Image (cartoon, rainbow, N blue to C red):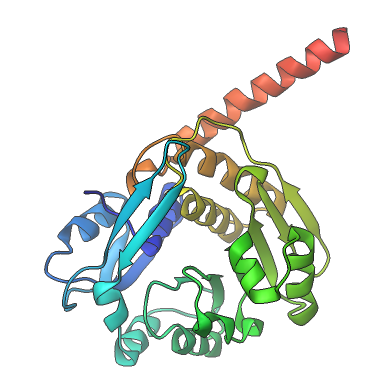
């Protein structure tokens, strides 16, 4: 049994990337394994309610190629009330960043309240459902989604068309479309950036997407350019896929920088060989 959940994974990724983060949600009396995991990475858990009927949990199936299928019971995450949301958001101010996934209740309410406070909203529309498809994405700052979720929103299969379709409707949106082994595609009003994936021997991809999101948003919050944030996020996600488990597979900043250094040396070595030939 391992600590996980999209919100927890993303919070830990943000923290390990070097940013200050506060985690909110709801667990039951059996949720100490999760709050302990967050505490170990210096994440504030004062806003986590312990009054849930039980803690959300999942059964994760992984095949020999490292791909996964997840069966989810949401538990306390689906019991978060509007009053609890109001209490949490009272702690934050205009310009603060809120990261949301669809494993909790009252997402539309949270988005409206956060937008009214002029917070920057990052939405990871996973798992996708009809409620998310009806959201006003005009209130979202960053939409970080995979190809299947992109198809649900746009009806398009081609990655470039998915991004174009979203930006046609929401010109001020910043879209990050993750493409698995093909990397990621970023788009905004002025730019398109293709980020390649770093090739590794994948063991378990369970938290790779959450790692990507956490590292990307952490770098953006520190003033990084989009292309540099994408590169760092891709390095971190590749490392996460080399280990089993969810939160425990998320690499530290030191590990990501070491991996970047090794890959950079390999790339320079390849270039020298080409030039000498």
Q: Residue at x 16, y 60 (%)?
A: 32
Tell me where residue 37 appears, x and y as whole percent.
25, 53
x and y percent of residue 101 in the render? 46, 70
Q: Which part of the image, by quadrant, shows the C terminus?
A: top right
* Nearer to me, 156 or 46: 156
Relative image position of residue 155 (x, y in whole percent): 70, 73
Q: Is residue 188 visible?
A: no
**Where is 208 relative to 124, above or below?**
above
Q: Quarter of the image holding residue 267?
A: top right
Quick one: which residue is furthest to the left in this view? 29
Residue at image position (18%, 64%) is 31
Residue 167 visible in the displayed image: yes
Seen from the viewer's position, the closer of residues 165 and 267 is 165
**Left or right of residue 150: residue 37:** left
From the viewer's side, name the closer residue of 180 and 220.
Answer: 180
Percent across and percent down for residue 268 are 73, 20
Q: Residue at x 38, y 57 (%)?
A: 70
Query: Please, is residue 170 above or below residue 266 in the view?
Result: below
């Amino acid at each position: 049994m391992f600590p996980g959940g999209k919100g927890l994974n993303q919070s830990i990724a943000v923290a390990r990337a070097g940013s200050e983060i506060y985690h909110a949600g709801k667990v039951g009396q059996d949720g100490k394994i999760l709050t302990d995991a967050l505490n170990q990475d210096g994440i504030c858990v004062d806003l986590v309610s312990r009054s849930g009927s039980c803690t959300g949990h999942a059964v994760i199936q992984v095949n020999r190629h490292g791909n996964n299928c997840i069966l989810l019971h949401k538990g306390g995450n689906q019991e978060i009330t509007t009053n609890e949301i109001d209490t949490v958001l009272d702690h934050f101010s205009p310009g603060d960043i809120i990261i949301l996934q669809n494993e909790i209740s009252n997402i539309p309410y949270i988005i409206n309240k956060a937008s009214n406070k002029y917070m920057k909203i990052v939405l990871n529309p996973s798992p996708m459902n009809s409620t998310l498809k009806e959201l006003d994405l005009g209130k979202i700052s960053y939409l970080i989604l995979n190809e299947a979720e992109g198809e649900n929103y746009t009806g398009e299969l081609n990655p470039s068309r998915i991004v174009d379709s979203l930006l046609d409707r929401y010109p001020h949106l910043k879209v990050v479309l993750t493409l698995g082994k093909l990397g990621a595609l970023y788009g905004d009003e002025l730019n398109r950036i293709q980020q390649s994936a770093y090739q590794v021997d994948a063991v378990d991809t369970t938290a790779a997407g959450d790692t990507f999101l956490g590292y990307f948003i952490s770098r953006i919050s520190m003033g990084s350019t989009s292309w540099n944030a994408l590169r760092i996020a891709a390095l971190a996600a590749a490392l996460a896929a080399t280990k089993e488990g969810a939160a425990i597979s998320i690499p530290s900043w030191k590990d990501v920088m070491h991996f970047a250094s090794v890959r950079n040396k390999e790339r320079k070595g390849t270039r020298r060989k080409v030039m000498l030939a």
